[in-house]
Amino acid sequence: MDVSLLVCTTCRAGQPVIEGEPVPGARLHAALERIGAPEGVRILPVECLSACSNGSAIALAGPDRWTYVYGQMSDADAPEIMQGAAAYAETPDGIVPWRERIAIFRKRSIARIPPIG
Amino acid sequence: MDVSLLVCTTCRAGQPVIEGEPVPGARLHAALERIGAPEGVRILPVECLSACSNGSAIALAGPDRWTYVYGQMSDADAPEIMQGAAAYAETPDGIVPWRERIAIFRKRSIARIPPIG
């Protein structure tokens, strides 16, 4: 079953906006697209995940599984994010065992939401 | 269509745990249950929304609508939370217009997640 990697493309990550230059969220989205999504994952750009004080923000979500929101991500984290997204996609419920979870996901969690019927 | 008000019952809200006393998340859950859920809303206790540094945390979620996560809630906020939950339930997509949104929801947003197909 496919899961979504939501990427906030409007995140400023606390940095001033420079005219003509993409904001950090847009740069992160571009870096993820360059790498390409692993099997079972689609990259979904979103305008504002309302986690502005913890940007750049991403989320992993899918049907009948836990949703996870992570913050303080930058384009330099893109390769690791894709590893984490692949591990998330491989689980039946979205819960990657703590020891197997990548460090940036362990340390920069904003919230998780259980699947609701 | 019914929506869920998820309440983290393990939130400590940065306070030390006192043996024999409920943690702030459990107190918030109890306060919400005392008021009772408005029509179309069910209260769903959850163990850990992983928003520990912003507790106590709650979330509003439902099928085919935006999910919202809010933090820094206490049992004193229970009446307002129920107002906000009722307004959320009355929308088709979960988006309560900004001007109509209760102040504690405007000010204490942790994240929002779009509905994904």
Image: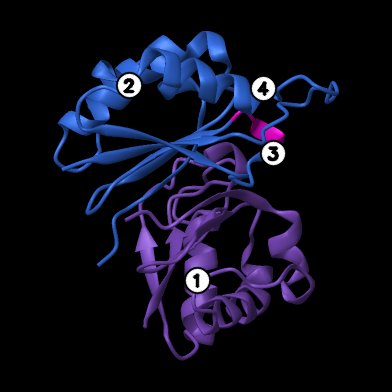
Chain colours: A purple, B blue
Q: Amino acid at mark 1?
A: Asp
Disc 1 secondary structure class: loop
Q: Residues within 10 Å of mark 2 (few under 14, many from 20)?
A: many
Residue for point 71% across, 25% down: B23
Q: Quadrant of the C terminus of chain A?
A: bottom left
Q: Could you tell me which residue is drawn at 20 percent across and 26 percent down?
A: B39
Disc 2 designates what residue? B84
Instruction: Residue type at mark 4: give it.
Output: Pro
Residue B103 in view of the camera: no
Residue placed under numbered mark 4 in the picture: B24
Crowd band around label 1 with a 10 angstrom C-alpha radius: few (<14), some (14–19), many (20+): some
Q: Which residue is mark 3?
A: B52
Give the vertical position of A37 relative to B18 (above or below): below
Q: Earlier in the sequence, mark 2 or mark 3?
A: 3
The residue depicted at 25 percent of the width and 39 percent of the height is: B94
Per the model, the C-alpha gap separating discs 1 and 2 is 29 Å
Residue B6, picture quadrant? top left
Q: Nearer the viewer, mark 4 or mark 2?
A: 4
Is label 2 in contact with label 3 (beta carbons under 8 Å)?
A: no
- The CA distance from mark 3 to mark 1 is 21 Å
Q: Position of residue B109 (x, y in %)?
A: 48, 31
Label 4 vs 2, first from the N-terminus: 4
Label 1 sits on residue = A93
The CA distance from mark 2 to mark 3 is 22 Å
